[in-house]
Image (cartoon, helix red, strand yellow):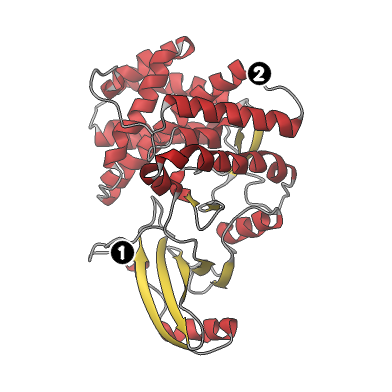
Amino acid sequence: MNALDTQSDKEDESLQERFDEDYLKSWLEPLVKEPISQFEFSKLKGDASDRSYFRVNYFPRHKNKSSLIVMQLKKPIPSKEPDFNRMQKFLTNLDMPVPTILHYDAKRGLIFLEDGGDTHLEDIAHKSPDNIIFWYQEAIELIVAMQTRVTKGMRPYCPAYALRFDVKKLMWEMDFMIKHYVKGFLNRKLKQNEESNVRTALLALCETLAKEERVFVHRDFHSRNLMIPGKKLLLLDFQDARMGPRQYDLVSLLKDSYVVLKEKNRNELLDYYLQRMEQEEDRPIPTSSFRRIFDWMSVQRNLKAIGTFAFQYMEHKNERYLEFLEPTLQYVRDTIHSRSDLKPLCQVLKQVIPELNEKNGEKAARL
């Protein structure tokens, strides 16, 4: 469901397609109830994951061209249903807009999905900024639905049920960032006391966040995982959902590495979320404390993203995410320098990540 991309000739064998025309015909022709005369395959550009994606255009003999998406898992897991499938069923039963699964082949590790097109929220944000508030409000409606309807519908069979953003998970992400961004990408040799100090400060941040009330969290609720196939959004990449703070998905959306919103728009959308949640839950939400946790959560979430981008470059030589390091650093920079309650963290972070010192240069373009 992502934009077309030319892949390297030196691909991992696990990324080569495990299907051909004869295989597709064997299950697709009974589904469409007529012969298929032609197929066209295109490899798609995935996000920072180990899955690979393909678009298949097919031409039924007496119908118009149609298409589907193939999600190919890195390795087949015949003995276990993938979390994606389990989560898709769970969300579908709760009327959430997720792609339909057309076919699943456990032995080949292939999941065939309805095609949501090529238009992401990211595309709309960059090409049609006048429509940005409408579509972001639609995205916030999905967050509200996840935090109310989906959270209330949580059951033990849902993969997210037993997973949570506790101190251990949040801190693991911070250690990942230290390893791959600070020590790897920046090539900084931390002294023992420097590493101890930054871990202690980040641990305090994670402990505060872990105390927050937990709701259903998508975990990667950003502009590249929201498709616009028509007049409604379609939600992607939900297989890693877990329970976490209310602010988590809101941070992913409003402090997105791929789309930098104007502060005015971000504040308007934050207010919209608070208004909608108060309506849904019929109770006031303390704005000041909510925004405080929103800012604290944004530091953790953006540092986590920085670690992911650095990992993609250092371990996989993937340069696609390097351009998003600076806007993500800017989010952290803005937040830790603007909140007095983050001053201790700010002082420690600047010692190990000098890039977080205030800059006089140009900021990222904002929409």
- Asked if one can make out residue 79 in the rendered structure from this viewpoint, the answer is no
Give whichever of 43, 81 is nearer the camera.
43
Q: Which residue is mark 1?
A: 12
**Quick one: label 2, few (<14), some, or many (20+) residues within 10 Å?**
few
Q: Of the residues shown, which amino acid type is indicated by label 2?
A: Pro
Q: Which quarter shows the C terminus?
A: top left
* Helix, strand or loop for disc 1: loop
Picture coordinates of residue 241 (x, y %)? 57, 46
Residue at point 68% right, 22% down?
A: 285
Q: Of the residues shown, which amino acid type is indicated by label 1?
A: Asp
Residue at point 61% right, 44% down?
A: 142
- Asked if one can make out residue 98 in the rendered structure from this viewpoint, the answer is yes
- 360 vs 84, left or right, is left
* Residue 286: mark in rendering: 2
Picture layout, residue 55 above or below residue 255: below
Q: Of the two numbered discs 2 and 1 on the same chain, state the one appearing first in sequence.
A: 1
Picture layout, residue 166 above or below residue 192: below
- 8 vs 22, left or right, is left
Q: Which quarter shows the N terminus?
A: bottom left
